[in-house]
Structures are given as structure tokens and as C-alpha cells.
Amino acid sequence: MARLIVEVALKALAGGLFVLGFAVLAEMMTPKRLAGVFSAGPSVALGSLLVTAVLSGQADMRAAADGMRAGAVAFFVYCLVAPPLLSAWGVWRATLAGLVVWAVTAAAVYLLLPRP
Amino acid sequence: MDDDMSDETNDDSNDGTNDGTNDDMGGDDPGSRGEDDDRMRLIPRELARTRPWDLVVRFAFGAGVSALAGVVSLVAGPALGGVFLAFPAILLASLTLVAQSEGPRQAYAEARGSVFGTLGLAGFAVVTTVLAARWPVWATLVTAAATWVVFGLGSYLVSRVIVRRAGG
């Protein structure tokens, strides 16, 4: 049990640090649309996959990346619907509605994508 | 990047009003004072204007999503946990912070830009899936990160060229 907690904590720390790195880059970038590219960077993935590979092995890392394909497709759809929702509803309602879109799309794509 | 990446301020990109309204979001029209009319720059001193709290929030979101992915991996397997490696929480945090500090127009521009990043993210996942069984971890992740740069920043640069040509 302690090992599992340490694994989750290490993933959280690594993911947070990579996110911080990408956020710092984004803050220094202009125009803002270029900064947006870094908001969809592989920050969480890099930190989490690195810890997964070290603690659980490359097979688990490969499986995680396989599932990530579905999340990435859903993220793409989220980014397509977010701007018009932002214009119509404002930031909070648009981002929350976008998360619902992400969850539905991710579930559908996860079930449909062929497993390698 | 074929544009100037010099260390200079960009007054045009930082004057978004912070009045909480949703107007003035048409910054991508070629004929208006659009985001794509601005040169791309890396401005280190912009970081000094960032509130430390904003960085703390982003770290917390990143750590939270990573922990969520880790817990789901333990409970339901690494493949399902992997879905959350592309969870848009970081963008969510960024959009709300940018909207508060720089106005809705800048948040809108950032949301539009993130589309290109997700193309890179999909490439990152596919490359990692293909290479993880064959290559060492470091080589796999470096190649996947390079794929994100090529697809994410590459598609952004291509879109700039297309918008400029369409705008004459």
C-alpha cells in the first residue's frame, strides 16, 4: 500500500513540475495563441509516463500511452468547442461544459480505438 | 520559427481589457488587430508580471490531474488511467486565470491556440505507443516530445502562413 501511495505522490510531483515548466514557457510566449499551444503540451504525460516506466515498467507505460490517444482526441474536440462556448457563455460555464464534452468523447474514442 | 524571438515587450498583446464581458473576441480576423498579426516572441521579463499564485494554481492542477491518472491506473489499469494524461485541466486553469488577469479576449486566443497543441499531443501518444515496446524509455519520450513540437508548433506556424495569405 505504501508503495502505491509513493507512486501516486511521485506522479503528482513530476506532473506538477512539468506543468509548471510548460506554464512558465507559455507565460513568456506571445502572441497568446502561441501560448495556448503550450497549454496543450504533454506536461502531465511526460511526468506520469516517466514515473510509470521507472516503477512499473515499459509495458504499463505503453498501455498508458495507448489510453492517452483517446484523451488526446477528446482534448482536440474540447479545444474546438471551447472558443465558441467562451464567446457565448463566459469562462466558467464554457470550461465546465467543455469538460463534459471531453469526458463523453474520451469514453467513446476509448471504446472504439483498436488496441495495438 | 521564422519570426523574431527577441526580448522585447509586446504592447499590443497585453492590453486586453479586464471588464468581464465577452465582447471583442474577434481577434483572429485578418482585417482586425488579430493575434496572428503579432510577431512571435519569447519575453523572459513577462514572467516577472506573473503572480506567484497563478503558478501555484497551475502546479496544483498538474499535480492533481497526475494523481487522478495515477489512482485510476491503480484501480482500473494503466490504459484507462492513460486517458487522463490528456485531461484539459491545465488549459482550464490557464483560461480562468488569463480571463481574470488579461481579459476574455486573451483567454479566447489561448483556447484557439491550444487546438494546435492537441494535434501534437495525439502524435505524442501514438509515437509513445509504437516505440515503448522497442526503444529505451528516454529515447521513446524524447522522440515523442519532438513529435509534439513538430505537430503542435508546426501546425501553428502553418496556420499563421495560411491566415496571412488569406488576408493578403
Image (cartoon, rainbow, N blue to C red):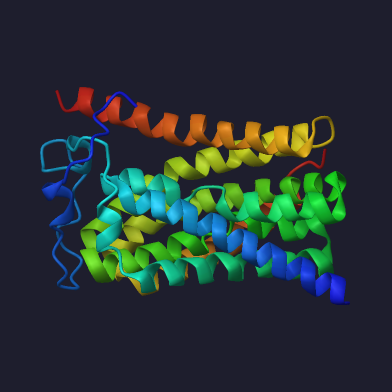
Above or below, B17 relative to A45? below
Give the quarter of the figure containing the N terminus of chain B: top left
Q: Is residue A41 left or right of residue A112?
A: left
Give the quarter of the figure containing the C terminus of chain B: top left
Q: Is residue B110 left or right of residue A53?
A: left
Q: Is residue B122 left or right of residue A59?
A: left
Among the 4 quarters of the image, the one containing residue B43: top left
**x, y (%) of residue A105?**
60, 56
**x, y (%) of residue B145?**
59, 37
Q: Nearer the viewer, residue A21 or A109?
A: A21
Residue positioned 12% across, 57% down in the render: B15
Residue positioned 64% across, 56% down in the render: B85
Count of numbered circles in the view: 0
Report the residue that reaches farthest toward the bottom: A1
Above or below, A49 relative to B30? below
Q: Nearer the viewer, residue A19 or A60?
A: A19
Above or below, B145 relative to A91? above
Above or below, B72 relative to B160? below
**x, y (%) of residue A2?**
86, 76
Among the 4 quarters of the image, the one containing residue B51: bottom left
